[in-house]
Amino acid sequence: MPGPNDTPQNEIMVMNADGSNLRSLTGHDKSLGGAGSPDWSPDGELIAFDIYSGARTGNYLINADGSGLKYLGAGCMPTFGAGGDRLAFSWSGTGMALMDLAGENREVLTPDGWGAQFSPNGKWVSYQSYGRTPTTRSINITIIDVASKEKRVILEGDEATRYSSIYWNMEWSPDSQQICFKGRIANSSDRYEVATTSIDGSSKGFRILTKETTDTDFGWHPDGSRILLAKTSPKHLGGPRLHVCDLKTGEITLLETQPLDMPNHSGVWSPNGKQIAFVSRRNPEPVPFQQIAASDRTASTGSATPELPPDR
């Protein structure tokens, strides 16, 4: 049985797209805290991610086989640029930033916004941004040119006032021409949608994929045909499961190859489409009952089952 103080923990998992060779990259070290926001390097050899532990969030790097875990310093949601030698990330209290794979040579691109995401071609970083007038506050998606630092917002017209929140971990299309994101409808506390927009402006291309409640992370298949997202499944209790949105038909279906016994989210395909990294909330490993101290057994008697930690 699990220890009385153990609770499920978010782990970075990797599997082949057909469900074979499932493995945890971070579950061996329970001291790390909850992991999230995985992103593959362009060569498929590394995975960047963040870990939340208490009040601190840090960036990490690990080999795709689970070896070579490296702490990269403060920040969250690291994503690779085209060359694979730099990461864009959000740096709380500082801004949208870049760093190398040692966590050094940090460069702040802009002090505003949240949710930095490198475009696959390495030209831009997108992020959630705010605009203000004397009477209103608007929310948008801004992209900043990494070389020139030129910025432009990409939600226009009705879309520029459509959302009261735009969530972190938006996703670029493989050709760096579109962004997939989750937004909360303005003047609503419980209406959301997942949409794609052209980076040339939403007037050049805007599409609502679903109005169902989903997680905030997405994964665009390298061939551009479909997007991984996480939402509840009527057949499976206890949290979201990975689903696939077919961009040609708009149909959203359960990813049957994933382990369905526990919640899964934040799925991203490897650059060749043959593997999927994702976050799963694994149960603690069982330990023999006699190894638990009597005082702990007494303290746990009659206690309610702990709530699952919230998805990030």
Image (tube, rainbow, N blue to C red):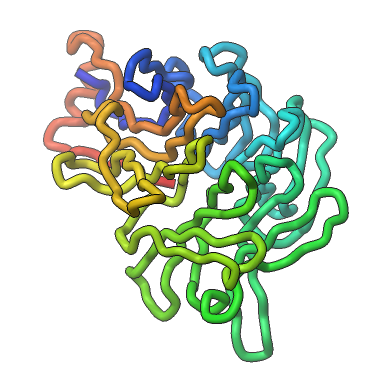
- Given residues 235 and 76, the one toward you in this image is 235
Classify residue 280 as left or right of residue 203: left
Q: Is residue 90 visible?
A: yes
Classify residue 133 as left or right of residue 26: right
Classify residue 233 as left or right of residue 109: left
Location of residue 89 (image quadrant)? top right
Q: Is residue 203 above or below residue 211?
A: below
- Given residues 101 and 92, the one toward you in this image is 101
- Given residues 121 and 290, the one toward you in this image is 121
Location of residue 28 (image quadrant)? top left
Q: Is residue 83 above or below residue 2?
A: below
Residue occupying image coordinates x 28% and y 27%: 257
Q: Is residue 307 visible?
A: no
**Which x, y percent locates residue 18?**
33, 22
**Which residue occupies the extreme right position in the image?**
148
Residue occupying image coordinates x 25% and y 31%: 256
Q: Is residue 245 above or below residue 34?
A: below
Viewport quadrant of the N terminus: top left
Residue occupying image coordinates x 67% and y 80%: 132
